Amino acid sequence: MLWQSVNGNFLFTQPRAGPLQPSSFLGVHFSPLLIALIPLYALLGTPCFLLVLQSAALALPAYYIYRIGVRVTGDERTALLFAVGYLLYPGTLWSNWYDFHLEAFVPLFTSMAYHYYLEDSKPRLLLSLALLLATFERTIFIVISFAAYVLARELLKARKDRGSRYLQPSTLNMILIIVLASGLYFVASERIMSSSWPERSLVQPARIVGKLSYEDLLIKVSYVTLLAGPLAFLPFWSPLELLPAAPYFLLAMATDYTPYFTIPWQYPALVTVPFFASAIMAASREKPRLTRRKLAVSITLFFLLAAPASLPMSSFSSNWRLPSPRWETALKHTALSSIEPDASVLAQEDYFPNVAERRVAYTLWPRDLDPPDYIVFDVLDYLFYYEPGGNTTRDQVLRLADAYGVAARVNGLVILRRGYEGPEANLAPLHVSLDLMEARKPYISQEDSYRETRFFVPADVRVQGNHIYVAEGQRGSIFWGPYLTLPPGRYRATVSFSADTQVEGALFDLKVYCYGVETYAERTVHGSEVAAGARSTLTLSFDLEEWAPSLKVTLISHGWAPLRIYSVELEGTP
């Protein structure tokens, strides 16, 4: 959207072309804040600045939390601990983990609102709430809830200080201004959004109240724990300060839309600051030394347990591990840089930022346009198999592939060029192997819910240390996967194994095939070919003359001798 706006196509954003996606960003959100970023993008000229800006926006509330802490508790060390705790807070770190989101600005403007309310600076409070509204239109629910919080807090203060049930006129006028201005802003923004995208549905009941499972309930309990636990559960002792978090917290508790109530998304940013404000208010009624001890323990514990790239979270999902550039990363940039600046490109979603600075670039190709000049995808990434708007990148590739040749490959990354018949730049061969730690693990993150790119081992097959153990008499499939979609080329599957005893019968079958389509290679290994206890290697080489829609490698045991499988690898050969 930013690049298109700078280059004369104001607010255009339709990477997923189709009736379910608006052509203007105004059909998605009304965000004066994001519109204000267009000149910055024109000046800096790189999407990387968005990620830096997001990190800065998420970090700055630590300053206001510190100021709130000093004012409420009167203890600088306690306030500093709250500020550090915010920077180490799972809700803060996870909001910064993936791509750029407007939700990242909500903590900053919310913390400003709490701070200037406590400072009794009405003009600055109004400015903070105006900036919060400018983030995107749905923050009106936070703003209205904040006005309700101010009303409740001021009524309590009036009763305590003056024994009165009435507010001061200036405070009442401010609350009325907030409510009226927010209502007018919301009505205007909704009209603009609906006119920009007539197909837009204002309310989606299935996403607000859905069918909840017992698993959803457990996840929601863990979500509440991850929000309150790092603050030693202090927020529960001052619930009034949680009022601005109520709309999106209650939505998270009611919906069956998993991202709203799981920590590894941007949505915790909508509620994090109220949890800190309530914890600080509760801490003001405790002894500072006791509060600091509890906070130090809980902040450290939950940082180690639940922060991105922490050991437990990394073990739950490979998608939650710390991404680090590898030698292939530079090769991928080299391959992508070979695409001409004026070329039209279809790219799967995680590669779209690399090609988005083009007049014609989509993640879902419009059927009324000529086919793209290039198609960019990664067969080892789940997003290749993900369904944006009813059509996966794989579906589009298989539909268009006959008119394209492979221009470059870097492991799983493939760049197709329309009408290309020249040599292939194979910068790094395909390589995927069976990971014993991942092979039988149930999925935790949404990214792991796709079978593609993964090997599987059935529950009745034992995994022992560095190998799979197959007992004598155990028959059937021992492993299978990874269901890859592969272009034509040369490949090989390699299995390292041993047999504990030597027998005459067949030990196992190794097979490479697409179910219901074609068998590309297979081999039966007999006991007479393998010395007892000796580690052996079997390699099946094969050529793909056409696209393989879902290729897998499987080993089927005959049960005549105990087997040990040490490694399984699928490789592409230049």
Image (cartoon, rainbow, N blue to C red):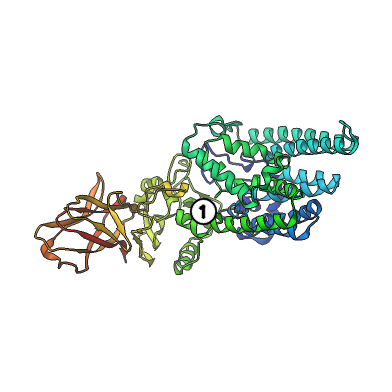
Residue situated in front as seen by the camera: 414 or 119:
119
Q: Amino acid at mark 1?
A: Phe
User: What residue lies at 35% left-to-right and 58% top-to-bottom?
Assistant: 436
Residue 210 location (% of width, % of height): 52, 31
Residue 273 in sight? yes
Tell me: residue 502, above or below residue 213.
Answer: below
Residue 493 in sight? no
Q: Which residue is mark 1?
A: 352
Tell me: residue 440, above or below residue 46.
Answer: above
Tell me: residue 368, above or below residue 40.
Answer: above
Residue situated in front as seen by the camera: 327 or 209:
209
Residue situated in front as seen by the camera: 336 or 495:
495
**Label 1 CA crowd tier, 10 Å (few <14, some 14–19, many 20+):** some
- Quarter of the picture holding the C terminus: bottom left
Residue 108 location (% of width, % of height): 71, 51
Name the image quarter holding residue 470: bottom left
Residue 47 location (% of width, % of height): 60, 58
Left or right relative to 564: residue 156: right
Left or right relative to 202: residue 18: left
- Element under disc 1: helix
Residue 556 location (% of width, % of height): 21, 52
Left or right relative to 428: residue 147: right
User: What residue lies at 33% left-to-right and 59% top-to-bottom?
Assistant: 434
